[in-house]
Amino acid sequence: MELTGAQILLESLKQEGVQHIFGFPGGAVIDIYDELPKSSIQHFLVRHEQGAVHAADGYARSTGKVGVCLVTSGPGATNTVTGIATAYMDSIPIVVFTGQVPTALIGNDAFQEVDIVGITRPCTKHNYLIKDVRELAHSIKEAFYIASTGRPGPVLVDLPKDVMQARTEFEYPKTISLRSYNPNYIPNRKQVKKAANLLAKAERPLIYSGGGVISSEAGEILTRLARRFSLPVTSTMMGLGAFPGNDPLWLGMLGMHGTYAANMAVNNADVLLSVGARFDDRVTGKVNTFAPRAKIIHIDIDPTSIRKNVNVHIPIVSDCLNALKTLDEEMGEIESVQWEEKHGDWVKTVKGWCREQPLKYETGQSGKIKPQYVLEKVYELTRGEAIITTEVGQNQMWAAQFYKYHKPRTWLSSGGLGTMGYGFPAAIGAQVANPDKLVIDIAGDGSIQMNIQEMATAVCYNLPVKIIILNNSYLGMVRQWQELFYNKNYCATCLDTAPDFVKLAEAYGAEGHQVDKSEDVVPVLKKVFASPKTCIVDIRVEPEENVYPMVPAGASLTEMLLV
Amino acid sequence: MRHVLSVLVENEPGVLSRVAGLFSGRGFNIDTLNVGPTLEKGVSLMTISTHGDEQIIEQIIKQLRKLITVIKVVDLSDTRAVEREMVLIKVHASENSRAEILRIVDIFRCKVVDVSTDELTLEVTGDQGKINAIVNMLQRFGIKEFARTGTVAMKRSMQL
């Protein structure tokens, strides 16, 4: 039977198992919206297209499924760019459908025309402009395949209006193969054997895991491997949750705001097993003093990650899950080593660092609420079972440090791009995908205002997302840098004009609370976590609290500023 | 060090922009770039000459391979390769200089493809060294126009 482009799109999404999409209509996609009510796909109307992409991203991060959004041409498309770049930097599988002016008008500067394929070329894994309805189904299949395989990432499909109206026979391809795209999932056994032997000789081994462990569902095998062979574990911010944050072998996050123990361990390790991480500058600090004593094993599915920033002794191009499974087998076959005994002293040393300089904060005389205290209480009250999203800045770092992540996909945060305004729409996406879970956005008073309009979305769909604003009336992280490195020149970081967040919540039909005293934190959080409504909790925290430890930009990891 | 990369790509709209954008976005250098169709329908060959240290070249090759529309990348600097470039040179040729220019044409085994009362247009084929040499020789007569294809290259069949 012949279908229109719009029908083919929705039918293809169904075939891909898509149940929820986030979007915003407009002239160029009105044909698709016209078909939408007949489809089984549930559409969530956002209030800004950036929110749609972040929601799709949060949906993807919290489930591992491909997140999908649909927006119109021109400004609708350009509004997705920040969200796409966010997903690209963090390797998140999403497919973004943008409307486009009719093919005959492309290039004519038509109303709401923009070359979105050109604009997003550097921040998508791949993108398509569909010029013929006969290519549509195939390209959608490719888009989902490319987004979700290999190193995942965003794919954009640009849909001219006339293509959505044109008709053709619909047949959805069952399989797909691309001669120019064949990600390597299986590790080279010889390389893995070498890695196993290197680890067998190691006196001071350390696992440095990253977001790749989460995207390849390798958290469980990572945990098993670390425990079986007594390997202490640190991770990037993107990797939080892959290894249980309450395990004795866990050292905390490493890098700029990493723990003392993690950074000291990297500095002293003799073998560093890097899994699904990419040696980002926020992790390495001054790159030529990073892990100076270590031989490095680097497992990554993306060959470009290997030897991009640091030299590697044993590269293993593979899916993290398969590589770790194989490594576990190979290490298991080495019978001559009593792992626990061999690494005992080293584990003792790193645990010593944990005790010597744990994450801490001064309780202070001011009587103001400490933001770290709030995170500790959020953790205790949720027993680490919540999905935490964050905005970007101090709120994000405290959420990374003081909440212990037990499971993968419970920590959703914009790592690579550092997108303020990410957390709330991402929480909406996560809540749609996980209706029975408690989803909490840890926000700052600055970043929450970047996508606050999504309050309407959350309330409209009865999504009980909890927004906890650590309100310090500053753009806190920039202020911290100004305090430490720019002679306290607090230029453009003071946010003393802010909305009344309680009233704002109420104006949207949500629940709002303000907390000014430490003793009120727990009772209010308890109440809010039990509420079936979208809630904002405006917590007035110590205004000039800093995130520590801190490695100044460009310094070595051991040059930490401590509390 | 200079490297010549042979890059086989899907011939579809935007492929050149993907490759060029990769170089500019990541701060890699393109010295010359040549693109043309191959005998296989839908497949084009790009020859890119670039330079950088070993680590940069490794990144360039890996990043190119990562593009979905790139089918194959070969670094011809790793093997023995034939490398050619063609230029068209329009050189000022007065009665006095014409004979000497034609002698140079002879020595370099290039061709005169167009002639007028005061100009000669030459077609020169060779590797970079030869092209640079003839340019040096002709400069004093006055080069009026200069069009260069950029390197094309191919692996030699047998390593003799």
Image (cartoon, grey):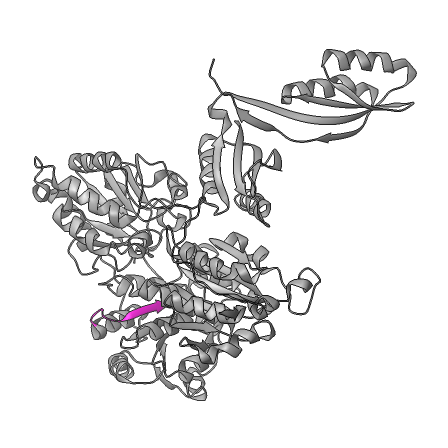
Hey, which quadrant is residue A388 in on the image?
Answer: bottom left
Asked if residue A392 lies left or right of residue A75, the reply is left
Residue A517: x %, y % from top left: 30, 80
Residue drawn at x 30%, y 34% is A313
Is residue B71 inside the magenta stretch? no
Toward the viewer: A530 or B95? B95
> What is the residue that sits farthest to the front in this orientation?
A1
Q: Residue at x 50, y 27 (%)?
A: B76
Q: Residue at x 53, y 68 (%)?
A: A5
Position of A27 relative to A235 (above/below): below
Residue A46 image position (x, y, % from top left): 47, 76
Which region shows up in magenta? A383-389
Residue B72 seen anywhere in this rendered image of the structure: yes
Of residues A71 and A503, the one nearer the viewer is A71
Front in this rendered view, residue A273 or A448: A273
Q: Nearer the viewer, residue A167 or A110?
A: A167
Q: Is residue A217 above or below residue A25?
A: above
Above or below, B7 against B67 in this view is: above
User: Which image quadrant for residue A323?
Assistant: top left
Q: Position of residue A259 (x, y in %)?
A: 27, 54
Residue A297: give x, y in percent of width and height. Answer: 28, 39
